[in-house]
């Protein structure tokens, strides 16, 4: 047991060095893409630090024969929401979200591909934590700085669920078991402005499909019994080679809230804390949207 513990400590140490080198490379060459100014967007709320939280909306215009109301009779319109940056230190997710916005705006709104549904993208739900991470990439510790919001709350443990508790766990590394830290989940369930902003938006827009972008576990996680999200997970496994898992059971998580509120939900854990992962995830995202 002693020697196994030393082995894992050494593995984690050298893994941290490797990730730091990769992070420097990604921040040097995988820049945050500028969002096309033509994409429709609006402010849906503000962070604790009074920073705007924006959502971008992409609706396909190449819809063929339309009814007087502007939609096709033979298609049940659906909405998909992508959310990035719920943990501010996961800076690569913000890059990925902005790639998603630009790419699908080009092919669905200005291109020839047919798409009758609506895509919403929130590039950064936690702009306060994200700003801290940009100033301190924290290469020496796997990019852990900036995870929480300005109140020190882990937003992905703050949602009003049956299992919410004020203190919870943050596990990361191999199978999320290499290291564990206790995290603060808020003064009460749903206490944070960022949490309230997301919930209000989902309910107002009647969104039934949600993909939350995280990193860097190289896996996808769905709620057991959710066949729609299971299919998304299988698509990710096919095209991105991400491992498939079922709900990790964190208290007050978006996954738990989605399950309790009948929202199809998938957690995507990308392969890099600092990189966009766009090339690796692009085909999977495209296939999921085409199957809507």
Image: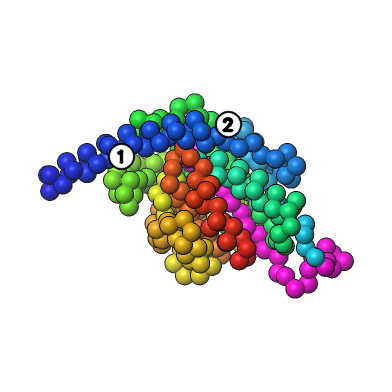
Q: Secondary structure at mark 2?
A: loop
Q: Is residue 39 left or right of residue 183?
A: right
Q: Position of residue 255 (x, y in %)?
A: 48, 56
3D distance between C-alphas at marks 2 and 1: 34 Å
* Residue sitting at x 75%, y 73%: 74
Q: Nearer the viewer, residue 257 or 62?
A: 62
Per the image, the residue denoted by label 1 is 15
89 lies above or below 251: above
Q: Position of residue 121 (x, y in %)?
A: 63, 48
Residue that sits furthest to the top in the current view: 135
Q: Which class describes the residues within 10 Å of circle 2: few (<14), some (14-19), or many (20+)?
A: some
Give the residues in magenta: 65-91
Between marks 2 and 1 in the image, the one whose residue lies nearer the viewer:
1
- Residue 68 is marked as none
Q: Residue 161: tell me if it is visible.
A: no
* Residue sitting at x 63%, y 40%: 53
* Residue sitting at x 72%, y 62%: 114
Residue that sits furthest to the right in the current view: 68
Q: Main secondary structure of the magenta part?
A: loop
Per the image, the residue denoted by label 2 is 49
Q: Secondary structure at mark 1?
A: helix
Q: Is residue 105 magenta?
A: no
Q: Is residue 89 magenta?
A: yes
Residue 185: quarter of image: top left
Q: Position of residue 235 (x, y in %)?
A: 50, 63
Residue that sits furthest to the bottom in the current view: 74
- Quadrant, the C terminus: bottom right
Q: Nearer the viewer, residue 199 or 278?
A: 278
Q: How many discs appear?
A: 2
């Amino acid at each position: 047991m002693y020697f196994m513990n030393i082995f894992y400590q050494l593995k984690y140490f050298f893994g941290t060095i490797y990730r730091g080198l990769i992070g420097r490379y990604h921040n040097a060459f995988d820049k945050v893409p500028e969002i096309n100014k033509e994409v429709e967007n609006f402010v849906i709320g503000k962070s604790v630090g009074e920073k705007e939280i924006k959502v971008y909306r992409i609706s396909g215009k190449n819809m063929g024969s339309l009814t007087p109301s502007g939609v096709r009779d033979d298609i049940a319109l659906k909405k998909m929401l992508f959310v990035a940056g719920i943990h501010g230190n996961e800076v690569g997710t913000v890059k990925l979200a902005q790639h998603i916005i630009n790419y699908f705006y080009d092919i669905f709104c200005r291109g020839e591909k047919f798409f009758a549904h609506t895509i919403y993208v929130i590039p950064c739900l936690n702009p306060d934590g994200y700003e801290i991470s940009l100033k301190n990439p924290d290469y020496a510790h796997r990019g852990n700085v900036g995870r929480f919001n300005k109140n020190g709350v882990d937003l992905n443990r703050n949602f009003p669920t049956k299992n919410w508790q004020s203190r919870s766990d943050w596990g990361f590394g191999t199978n999320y078991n290499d290291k564990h830290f206790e995290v603060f989940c808020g003064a009460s369930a749903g206490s944070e402005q960022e949490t309230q902003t997301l919930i209000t938006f989902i309910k107002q827009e009647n969104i039934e499909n949600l993909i939350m972008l995280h990193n860097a576990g190289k896996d996808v996680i769905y709620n057991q019994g959710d066949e729609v999200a299971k299919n998304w997970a299988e698509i990710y496994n096919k095209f991105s080679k991400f491992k498939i898992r079922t709900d990790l059971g964190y208290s007050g998580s978006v996954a738990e809230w989605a399950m309790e509120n009948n929202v199809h939900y998938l957690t995507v854990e990308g392969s890099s804390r600092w990189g966009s992962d766009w090339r690796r995830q692009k085909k999977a995202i495209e296939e999921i949207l085409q199957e809507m």
